[in-house]
Image (tube, helix red, strand yellow):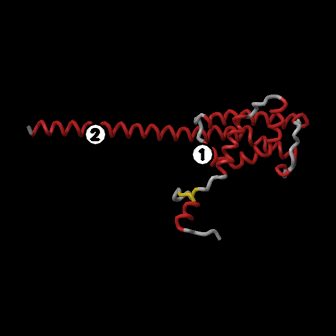
Amino acid sequence: MDIQLIMAMASVITGIGTISAVVVAVLSIQADHERKKKQATIEAYDQISNTATLPLWIALRETYGEDYSTKNIDEDIKNVDKKLKDIFLLYCRKMERFSVGIDINVYDFDTFYRLSGESTAELFKNIEPLIKRQRKKTDISFCDEFINLNKKILKEQNLPKMNKKGKIKNLLIKELFNEEEN
């Protein structure tokens, strides 16, 4: 009887060990997938940044001067020079594809936001008149996904900022400790 009990316990322990190994394997696969998704986001946005974002910033500065962001960019895309128009359209195509990737979880929004969310929203604000004009003139669905990504960025900007050390919302800390703002 003792041997049967020992065999039963060994069987249970083996089962527990097997289940634990499967859980660890699944968690490892998930962690690896998340790491690869973040890496893919960094690589994809780096490529967009080098081939489209930077050239667009440069073309905007060449066309409107260093303080172009404070100027009203010409809404009539026909009056925009061909070089700026081509760079603008390239940037929009690339950001549209990237935005789809964010939307379907091929790319990681949080990683993108930390890389370039704020500056992407700023650039979007500057080129929005051109996007609106392009939508009116040629295609009402032009940049739909990019527009949705920008809305998501703006929503993220309005969320309470996290305390990176403790990952606790600053507003929650104030509520818990009844801290008043100075």
Query: Is 56 left, or right, of 105 in this rendering?
Result: right
Residue 34 point in image, percent of width and height: 51, 40
Which label sits on residue 16?
A: 2
Which residue ends up furthest to the right in the rendered image? Answer: 79
| Residue type marked 1 | Asp
Q: Which residue is drawn at 84% across and 49% down?
A: 68
Q: Quadrant of the C terminus?
A: bottom right
> For this rendering, which residue is in front, 116 or 157?
157
Q: On the image, numbered disc 1 is attached to which residue?
A: 110
Residue 179 point in image, percent of width and height: 57, 69
Marks 1 and 2, Cα distance to the nearest angstrom? 36 Å
Asked if 73 appears above or below 142 in the picture, the reply is: below
Q: Which residue is drawn at 24% across and 40% down?
A: 13
Query: Is 25 left, or right, of 151 in this rendering?
Result: left
> For this rendering, which residue is in front, 3 or 136?
136
Q: In which quarter of the image is the N terminus?
A: top left
Residue 57 point in image, percent of width and height: 78, 44
| Residue type marked 2 | Ile
* Number of residues whose C-alpha sits closer than 10 Å to that of mark 1, classed few (under 14), some (14–19) or many (20 or more): some
* Number of residues whose C-alpha sits closer than 10 Å to that of mark 2, classed few (under 14), some (14–19) or many (20 or more): few
Asked if 139 appears above or below 119 in the picture, the reply is: above
Residue 11 sits in quarter: top left
Which label sits on residue 40?
A: none
Query: Is 82 left, or right, of 37 in this rendering?
Result: right
Q: SS at mark 2?
A: helix
Q: Which residue is drawn at 63% across and 44% down?
A: 112
Among the two numbered marks 1 and 2 on one chain, the one whose residue lies closer to the N terminus: 2
